[in-house]
Image: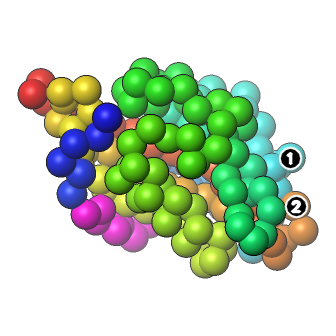
Amino acid sequence: MVRGMRPPRELTADAVTHPKIRRMHEYWLAKCAGRPMPSRADIDPLDLRDCLGNLCLLDVVGDAPRRFRFRVDGSNLAALSGFELTGKFVEDMPDPDYRDFVLALYERVVAEKAPIFLAVAAEWKGCGIEEISVTLPLSNDGVTVDGILDAVFPVRLQEG
């Protein structure tokens, strides 16, 4: 369960110093190839092998209500959170506060059709953690967000 989650700090792409978050954003921009967003098919997991354990790949399902299904929940993230979400929906997350935060983030990415960079501090399984993330929209038609690539990296761990 998540405890003590503080309001996230929004970052700009220029303010992000974490090398893997910067790399994920640069990869996404390259895959756009002049389009507003790349498609899911443009994303090659082999290109991202050094980040795979910290990535979530989601399908955006339906419209009213919209749902988000985890196609992949990175193994490092599942170990950190204590729950595996591959094949499940955001509403299956056991922690209601974290679920509401993630749902709002994904809804915002769908609405804005643009990357969102965040720093979030919380306590997971007795450890204080700050995570840096980039949440990236994917689109098969270049207009409608039908997928999300979420990269989340812990940057500080403190035993609680």
Amino acid, disc 1:
Ala
Looking at the rendered structure, the secondary structure element under dot 2 is loop
Q: Position of residue 89 (x, y in %)?
A: 64, 44
Camera-side residue of 119 and 26: 119
Task: Name the residue at 58% across, 68% down.
Answer: 107
Determine which residue is flagged by label 1.
Answer: 41
Compared across the picture, whether 101 is left or right of 35 comes to left
Q: Is-magenta flag for residue 10?
A: yes
Task: Name the residue at 86% across, 46% down.
Answer: 41
> How many marks on residues?
2
Residue 51 seen in the figure:
no
Say if 111 sits above or below 121 in the image: below
Q: CA distance from mark 2 to mark 1?
A: 8 Å
Task: Bin the neighbour count of mark 2 within 10 Å (Cα to Cα): few under 14, some 14-19, many 20 and up.
Answer: some
Amino acid, disc 2:
Asn
Q: Are marks 2 and 1 in contact (CB under 8 Å)?
A: yes
How is the structure coloured here? Answer: rainbow
Determine which residue is flagged by label 2.
Answer: 140
Residue 41 seen in the figure:
yes
Range covered by the magenta-colored residues: 7-16
Which circle's residue, 2 or 1, is located before the other in the chain?
Answer: 1
Compared across the picture, whether 139 is left or right of 12 comes to right
Task: Name the residue at 31% across, 56% down.
Answer: 119
Looking at the rendered structure, the secondary structure element under dot 1 is helix
Task: Bin the neighbour count of mark 1 within 10 Å (Cα to Cα): few under 14, some 14-19, many 20 and up.
Answer: few
Q: Position of residue 84 (x, y in %)?
A: 54, 26
